Image (cartoon, rainbow, N blue to C red):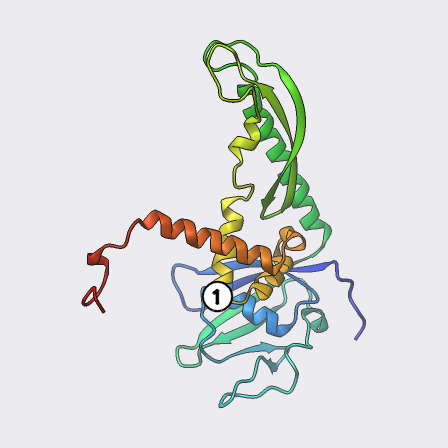
Amino acid sequence: MPELPNTVIYQLRITLRGISPLIWRRLLVYAETSIADLHYILQLAMGRTDSHLHRFLIHGKEYGIAYDGGMGFADDPRQMRVADFRFRLRERFLYEYDFGDNWQHDIRVEQIVAEEAKTVLERIQQRIVEQQAAEYLRTQRSCLQCGNKRSHKGDHRVTIRTLFGKLRLTSPRLYHCQCQPHRVRTFSPLAERLLERKTPELLYLETKWASLMSYGMTTKLLDEVLPIGKHVNAATVRNHLQAVAERTEAELGEEQVFFIDGCPRD
């Protein structure tokens, strides 16, 4: 089949049949996404655990990942791409999961967009964050105690990782006002405000997905759906997951006997 450029993205709406109130998701996937990867993406998006059989029904033919003891498929799901089906706008296909409970998902092509859409999102976020940073810095230009204007020493750049990519902001260094004693002469209000340099939304997605699949697959999925993917690797995701796990464990405090089932000595 003729090749589609890597910049084509499909916007898909997934609706679960027979459920009220309505359960649905909206996803952006590359045209180059394989059927196998689309299965894994749907599992995450719908909160599944990939513990049952599944199949896609597209243009009257079945596709999916074959497992021992389960149904087989004529085509390799890792070679079949979304682009190969040449979907049209508003075209539908079916995804079934767990043939016992028979969860059926209607998938509709809402839009076919260009890669530049994610770039636009990244630029919009950059502008919004720049304005928010400017508003905060305006409150720090004068001493909060006496109101005198703080002297400006210089500027440096700080980088923040968000769902929409790396944002680079100008962070001024100011002199402390002499009306109060300080251990150091200067400080950077923005750098002190952004200690982690990673947004909570990014950490949430990284830790949630990495707890369900490999670090490499998590990185690939981030690259599929968000601009941040081009800036992360498996090691970064692993480090972020471990940091969140350590912080969460620290917040629990010391282990208490009443948290433990059975004898504490076992």
Q: Residue at 19% across / 67% down in the picture?
A: 262
Depicted 7 relative to depicted 187: above or below: below
Depicted 12 relative to depicted 39: above or below: above
Q: In which quadrant is the N terminus drawn?
A: bottom right
Q: Position of residue 18 (x, y in %)?
A: 41, 68
Q: Is residue 260 left or right of residue 210?
A: left
Q: Position of residue 197 (x, y in %)?
A: 56, 41
Q: Is residue 205 visible from the viewing direction of this image?
A: no
Q: Nearer the viewer, residue 11 or 155?
A: 155
Q: Residue at 71% across / 69% down in the picture?
A: 83
Q: Position of residue 51 (x, y in %)?
A: 44, 76
Q: Nearer the viewer, residue 205 or 178?
A: 178
Q: Residue at 40% across / 65% down in the picture?
A: 19
Q: Is residue 197 visible from the viewing direction of this image?
A: yes
Question: Which residue position holds label 1?
Answer: 212
Q: Is residue 149 left or right of residue 81?
A: left
- Which residue sits furthest right? 2
Where, by quadrant of the figure, is residue 158 drawn?
top right
Amino acid type at circle 1 is Leu
- Which residue sits furthest bottom? 69
Q: Residue at 23% across / 54% down in the picture?
A: 256
Depicted 129 relative to depicted 102: above or below: above
Q: Position of residue 247 (x, y in %)?
A: 41, 49
Q: Is residue 89 left or right of residue 203?
A: right
Secondary structure beneath dot 1 equals: loop
Q: In which quadrant is the C terminus drawn?
A: bottom left
Crowd tier of the residue under label 1, counting other residues whose Cα lies within 10 Å: few below 14, some 14–19, many 20 or above: some
